[in-house]
Amino acid sequence: MTTEIILQTIISGLLMGFIYALVAAGLSLIFGLMEIVNFAHGEFMMLSMYAAFWLYTFFGLDPLLSIPICAALLFGLGVATHYGIIRHILDAPMMVQITATFGLAIFLRSLAQFLWTPDFRTIPDPIVAGRIEVMGIFLGVPQLVASAGCVLAFAFLYLFISRTETGLALQATAQDREAASLMGIRPDRMYALGWGIGSACVAVAGVLLTSYYFIFPEVGLIFALIAYVTVAMGGFGSLIGALVAGVLIGLVEALGGLLIDPAFKYVIVFSMYLGIVLVRPKGLFGRY
Amino acid sequence: MAAPGFLSETPDDPELAAARAEPLRAPPSRGQWILGAVIGVCLLAYPLVFDQPYQQHVLIMIFIYALMAQGWNVLAGYCGQISLGQAVFFGIGAYSAAFLFSNFQISPWLGMAVGVVVSMVVALLIGIPTFRLKGHYFAIATLVIGEIAQTVFINWEYVGGATGIWIPIEWDAPWFAFQFHDSKLPYYYIGLGFLALACLCVYWLERSRTGLYFRAIREEPEAASSLGTDVTRYKLIAIMVSAAFTSVAGSLFTQYILVIDPETVFPLILSILVVLMTMMGGVGTLWGPIIGTAVLFPLSEMTRIYFGGSGGAEDLMIYGALILLISVFYPRGLIGLVHKVMGRGSHA
């Protein structure tokens, strides 16, 4: 095994890790606000991938250009989910919150299969294509662009949360709903905004993936599973935790697949989760 | 002679004595006994009246799923530990029966017993480390343990790998081989028997001290712990009982279907289905898992028949929407609705 192969694997793992991080960031943001895990997160991603696919098919719009449209669509879906479903189960037991979002996930997945068949689809010739060679290491341009996009979106999200007044209001609501509402922040709106932004995050990751990934109704499953593990590993509600855990998972998945056995790459990732939470039961950076 | 203090209650205060004597769960009233007896007789007579294989198949599958759902109910409904990895125990039960019979000609009845023991040991091994985790951290831990188990079995060639196990057909000794090819009746009554046994266990649990500890742990783990309840010990009891029920369900499923592979007995969706079925009926109630399964399983079968094999997943669409609506509008499940109609306050 040459150094090139290992280096190559590390870089591919890193690239995937940034995508995992953005998917997980959306989930983590929602959890931080109201301690609800959206088990339909992967299906939101799937819907945004289909949105990008249809925009390409009907209007010839390249996925890169349809990012804002898909993000806006999913923002709307997130807000609608909050007002239609989540608002009613805010104070319900955790079990009810799990089954409600699982029900939504099953519904959306089968709706996609019903409307668009279980076929695997691809976007035939996206703008970003091909690969480049840097010092003997080959990098797929779509992968590179997707990861760069996710890093950008993550940075944007982080700055929004920590620097803008609305972001601070979100944080305040996450810390103390009552106190925030005494300060004139309307928690209900903040929740809706959180769902919108969280869903837009996963939409951006989904659209960026369409340049090189298959689009099918169950595409969200593995990404969602990884995202739950990422968020829990990083600590529910922590954006930095999501970033660190996402990159860590991307690396371990790629290296584990190379050094041990590709069939066991998820087993290695999941075992790492178990190992970490057994030492730190609230994840690496968790508050909850 | 102590004056009747206003702080200390006199032991012969009749109201207090009455309150103390009142058990948490009243014994069933005469109406409930009659209802239970009627349901029992109906279930016993059902396969004699409805003799079409399909009609019996639906009930057999309901028994198997309800048994598994009851297992989840003990752990999550009564003890509050939300496991999303019940398929692990189902798979162990399924593989124990199938593997021991096809490789060593050991009767699946013994295989079932081995499955129960192995599941309970695995439950301990899962429970001891993960019960330190709370809420979603625990749920996700059980979920990834389920995924790990599936991957391990897919790649474990000794037990059939991804192809799984085709159980050799045995015509001569149906009771030894636990295979009945002439009639579904034995499967029906065996399934019903195990489900009834599980329900009896839960019935007893509801009225026992252990059941009280379970509920205390579910509602207020810190308070329960500070009052001297050995929280971890009772959680471990809950997960072991849960594993035993689920493992038996897995063995029954294997003997009924006679072909198993990791995709059928270890899938994530199975772990989710039992959650949804129990939720549908009513979590933390004796009848909830049964009502939920009895409604959801036929519903998904009917929609599948109605829409045919169009591959459009209409059945799952209705399924998902229903679960969503029940969770949002009737979080107590159908049993909450039943109690409301019968004019009793539901005390889940």
Image (cartoon, rainbow, N blue to C red):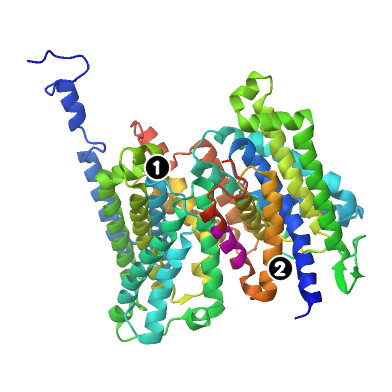
Instruction: Locate residue B249, reporting x and y percent.
Output: 38, 64
Q: Residue at x 66, y 39 (%)?
A: A81
Q: Nearer the viewer, mark 1 or mark 2?
A: 2
Q: Is residue B291 magenta?
A: no
Q: Is residue B182 above or below residue A273?
A: below
**Can residue A53 be seen by looking at this rendering?**
no
| Figure label count | 2
Instruction: Locate residue B342, reporting x and y percent.
Output: 34, 34
Q: Quadrant of residue A250?
A: bottom right
At label 1, the amino acid type is: Arg
Closer to us: B175 or B128: B128
Q: Which quarter shows the N terminus of chain B? A: top left
Q: Which secondary structure class fits the magenta region best?
A: helix
Instruction: Locate residue B271, reporting x and y percent.
Output: 50, 58
Q: Is residue B118 above or below residue B171?
A: above
Instruction: Locate residue B326, reporting x and y percent.
Output: 51, 41
Extent of the magenta region: A268-275
- Mark 2: give few (<14), some (14-19) or many (20+) Cα within 10 Å: many
Whole-number angstrom distance, CA of label 1 to CA of label 2: 40 Å
Residue that numbered label 1 is attached to? B218
Disc 1 chain ID = B
Residue that numbered label 2 is attached to? A254
Q: Residue at x 25, y 44 (%)?
A: B207
Q: Is residue A270 magenta?
A: yes
